[in-house]
């Protein structure tokens, strides 16, 4: 989990301890935190893919030949 997700998790625990929350709310928050973690993982993977594709970006032979004509 990222620092941001950890922050929200701690904040949720503090609110639960101080004020109490319905179980449905806690389940919703847990689902949202899990989704946040999945989106962060996906975002990192996409960033890596973009960086990789940018580094290996070479013109195809056909394109290069067409441009030189």
Image (cartoon, rainbow, N blue to C red):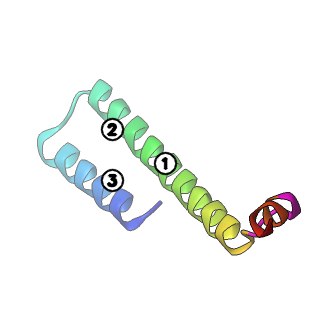
Among numbered discs 1 and 3, the one appearing first in the sequence: 3
Q: Where is residue 61 in the image (x, y as percent from the top left)?
A: 87, 64
Which image quarter holds the C terminus?
A: bottom right
Real-space Cα distance between discs 1 and 2?
15 Å
Which of the 4 quarters of the picture holds residue 27? top left
According to the image, label 3 marks what residue?
9
Residue 61 among those drawn in magenta: yes
Type of secondary structure dominating the magenta stretch: loop
Furthest residue to the left? 19
From this view, report whether residue 44 is shown above or below residue 20: below
From this view, report whether residue 28 is shown above or below residue 15: above
x 34%, y 31%: residue: 28
Among numbered discs 1 and 2, the one appearing first in the sequence: 2
Q: What is the crowding at mark 3: few (fewer than 14 residues within 10 Å), some, or many (at least 20)?
A: some
Q: Where is residue 39 in the image (x, y as percent from the top left)?
A: 49, 48
Real-space Cα distance between discs 1 and 3?
16 Å
According to the image, label 2 marks what residue?
29
Q: Give the range drawn in magenta.
A: 58-62
Front of the two marks 1 and 2: 1
Q: Where is residue 30 in the image (x, y as percent from the top left)?
A: 39, 39
According to the image, label 1 marks what residue?
39
Real-space Cα distance between discs 2 and 3?
9 Å
Residue 22 among those drawn in magenta: no
Instruction: Look at the numbered disc 3 and give the secondary structure of its residue.
Output: helix
Instruction: Look at the numbered disc 1 and give the secondary structure of its residue.
Output: helix
From this view, report whether residue 25 is shown above or below residue 38: above
Instruction: Look at the numbered disc 2 and give the secondary structure of its residue.
Output: helix
């Amino acid at each position: 989990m990222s620092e941001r997700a950890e922050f929200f998790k701690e904040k949720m625990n503090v609110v639960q301890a101080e004020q109490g929350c319905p179980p449905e709310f806690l389940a919703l928050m847990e689902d949202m935190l899990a989704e946040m973690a999945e989106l962060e993982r996906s975002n990192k993977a996409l960033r890596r893919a973009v960086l990789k594709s940018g580094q290996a970006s070479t013109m195809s032979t056909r394109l290069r030949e067409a441009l030189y004509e």
